[in-house]
Amino acid sequence: MNNRNQQPLLGLRSALILLLGSLVAVAAGVLTVLAGGAIASAVLAAGAAFGAGVLFFHTIIA
């Protein structure tokens, strides 16, 4: 079980892109709720922001 030759589950670049996408999604969801939107609208906005954020950061992070 303690094999030192195992590769990580996610690479550093992938982890960073997913982290930044998640942060963008949380920010979009919170801002939607604070603007008076419903929770369902916030979830939809967060999902769209996550997809756009991941695509954006995948493009700019080399």
Image (spheres, helix red, strand yellow):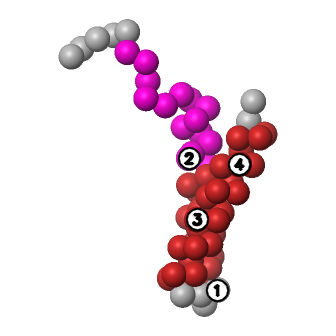
Residues at discs 2 and 3 in contact (Cβ within 8 Å): no
Give the label on residue 55, or none: 4
**Which mark, residue 19?**
2
The type of residue carrying mark 3 is Gly
Q: Earlier in the sequence, mark 1 or mark 3?
A: 1
Which residue is at 54% across, 87% downward? 38
- Residue in the picture at 62% in, 42% down: 17
Q: Secondary structure at mark 4?
A: helix
Q: Does label 4 or label 3 sit earlier along the sequence?
A: 3
Residue 12 shows which numbered tag?
Answer: none
Residue ID for mark 3: 47
Q: Which residue is nearer to you in this view: 56 or 20?
A: 56
How far separated are the C-alphas under marks 4 and 2?
Answer: 13 Å
- The residue identified by callout 1 is 35
45 relative to 23, above or below:
below
The reply to whether discs 4 and 1 touch (Cβ–Cβ < 8 Å) is no
Which comes before the other along the chain, label 4 or label 1? 1
Q: Can the viewer see residue 30?
A: no
Q: What separation in Å lies between label 1 and label 3 (alpha carbons)?
A: 17 Å
Category of crowding for the residue at label 2, using alpha-carbon neighbours closer than 10 angstroms: few (below 14), some (14–19), many (at least 20): some
Query: In the structure shown, which secondary structural element does the residue marked by tag 2 occupy?
Result: helix
The stretch of residues the image draws in magenta is: 6-20
